[in-house]
């Protein structure tokens, strides 16, 4: 960020959040190359969690705890499985990885007073407590950070897209979002370009892309969702069939006259792609399993879309409510797109839903 940015609202928060996400991205990218099977657990909901998820949460929460000690954090992971005897090997590995990351040399834009650099190793207890700073219940008032240390863990394990996602809520409104995508090509039109991007948006100040390897000194690209026609439009959707109802998306696409094939990608990298004009509609409709969406899965992505000039809502066109706690509340899907097509997508969803209901009655 340039020096004259310091007078802007949330300038300090933005700088800290970008630095924290960048360090966590370096960590997760290096973990992927060395990950062995025993370093992954399966959670109660059957989803995987790796040493990468835990260590990234330890690093980001440690930095936030030092820089904004009064701010609570709603984070995806908790340290309970690491505190028991059977978690010792995993715990040792996480302590090693988190400390390697926190004690790496300061980069431009970082400050030693944030507790970073060679003299700042933490104890195992400090790091487990940092992970558990993420246990806050959330709610409608005050400043609250929300963190997904690895969003799209299944994509991460496949070597495909995943994202490190951090957002700041103030009175339930997202004011700042930062998303790190270590595997996303820097140039949307060139899949062979260098990989690794950071995206950030601040309310009223726009949405931007930065290079992951030079977050504070590199080129900063302002993002804007372009207008689209049925011929240029395509859908951005999940890879995992259990996460969103792809057959429903197909019908919505037919109603809208979409001819291009959908782009399937894991994680909030989809919001990043949409924000930079690489795809037209993010569509995530529930599969009917009763799964409730989590605030950390959409907070950072939502402000990126809005600040890039787009609209995000549930499948009925209602705003997302980040003030209900750790969950987003009633799940009627999520739709994000440019302003020009959003209403049309909502109308097409309504029509597809009505058709589905008529079919189930007959
Ligand atoms: N049954 C489910 N339905 C919808 N989303 C899910 C489900 N299980 C896990 N997720 C979360 O969906 C998000 C990824 O969705 P996608 O990549 O399909 O857009 C992740 O946040 C993932 O959690 P996690 O953060 O643990 O990976
Ligand atoms: Mg998970
Ligand atoms: Mg997630
Ligand atoms: Mg996650």
Image (spheres, rainbow, N blue to C red):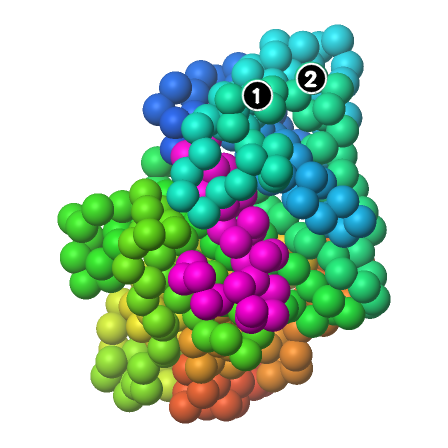
Vertical placement of residue 191 versus 76, above or below: below
153 or 182, nearer to the observer? 182
Q: Are marks 2 and 1 in contact (CB under 8 Å)?
A: no
Magenta span dominant secondary structure: helix
60 or 226, nearer to the observer? 60
Label annotation for residue 303: none
Residue 259: x and y in percent read 25, 78
Residue at image mark 1: 119
Nearest to the eye among marks 2 and 1: give it: 1
Vertical placement of residue 351 versus 53, above or below: below
Residue at 55% x, 58% y: name it.
14
Real-space CA distance between mark 2 and mark 1, rounded to the nearest whole angstrom: 13 Å
Residue at 76% x, 29% y: name it.
129
Residue 171: x and y in percent read 77, 70
Magenta extent: 1-28
Residue at 61% x, 33% y: name it.
115
Helix, strand or loop under label 2 = loop
How many tags in the picture? 2
Q: In the rendered view, does 223 fall on the left or right side of 327?
A: left
Residue 2 is a magenta residue:
yes
Q: Quadrant of the C terminus?
A: bottom right
Residue at 64% x, 68% y: name it.
174
Residue 361 appears in view: no
Residue at image mark 2: 123
């Amino acid at each position: 960020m340039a020096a004259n940015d310091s007078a802007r609202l949330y300038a300090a928060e933005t700088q800290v959040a970008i630095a924290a996400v960048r360090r966590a991205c370096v960590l997760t990218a290096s973990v992927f190359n060395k990950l062995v099977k025993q370093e992954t657990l399966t959670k109660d909901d059957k989803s995987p969690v790796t040493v990468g998820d835990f260590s990234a949460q330890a690093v980001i929460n440690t930095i936030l705890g030092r820089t904004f000690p009064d701010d609570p954090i709603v984070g995806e992971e908790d340290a309970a499985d690491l505190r028991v005897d059977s978690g010792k090997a995993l715990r040792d590995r996480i302590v090693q990885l988190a400390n390697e990351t926190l004690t790496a040399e300061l980069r431009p834009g970082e400050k030693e007073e944030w507790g970073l650099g060679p003299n700042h190793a933490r104890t195992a207890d400090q790091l487990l407590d940092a992970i558990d700073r993420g246990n806050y219940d959330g709610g409608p008032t005050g400043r609250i950070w929300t963190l997904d240390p690895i969003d799209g863990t299944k994509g991460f394990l496949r070597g495909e897209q995943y994202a490190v996602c951090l957002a700041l809520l103030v009175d339930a409104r997202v004011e700042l979002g930062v998303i790190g995508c270590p595997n996303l090509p820097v140039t949307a039109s060139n899949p062979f370009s260098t990989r690794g991007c950071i995206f950030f948006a601040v309310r009223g100040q726009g949405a931007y892309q930065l290079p992951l390897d030079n977050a504070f000194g590199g080129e900063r690209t302002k993002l804007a969702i372009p207008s689209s026609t049925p011929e240029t439009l395509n859908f951005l959707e999940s890879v995992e069939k259990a996460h969103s109802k792809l057959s429903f998306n197909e019908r919505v696409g037919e109603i809208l006259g979409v001819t291009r094939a959908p782009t399937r990608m894991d994680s909030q990298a989809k919001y990043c792609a949409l924000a930079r004009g690489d795809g037209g509609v993010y569509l995530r409709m529930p599969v009917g399993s009763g799964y409730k969406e989590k605030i950390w899965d959409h907070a950072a992505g939502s402000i990126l879309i809005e600040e890039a000039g787009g609209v995000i809502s549930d499948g009925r066109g209602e705003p997302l409510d980040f003030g209900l706690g750790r969950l987003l509340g009633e799940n009627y899907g999520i739709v994000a797109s440019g302003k020009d097509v959003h209403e049309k997508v909502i109308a097409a969803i309504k029509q597809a839903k009505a058709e589905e209901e008529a079919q189930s009655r007959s």
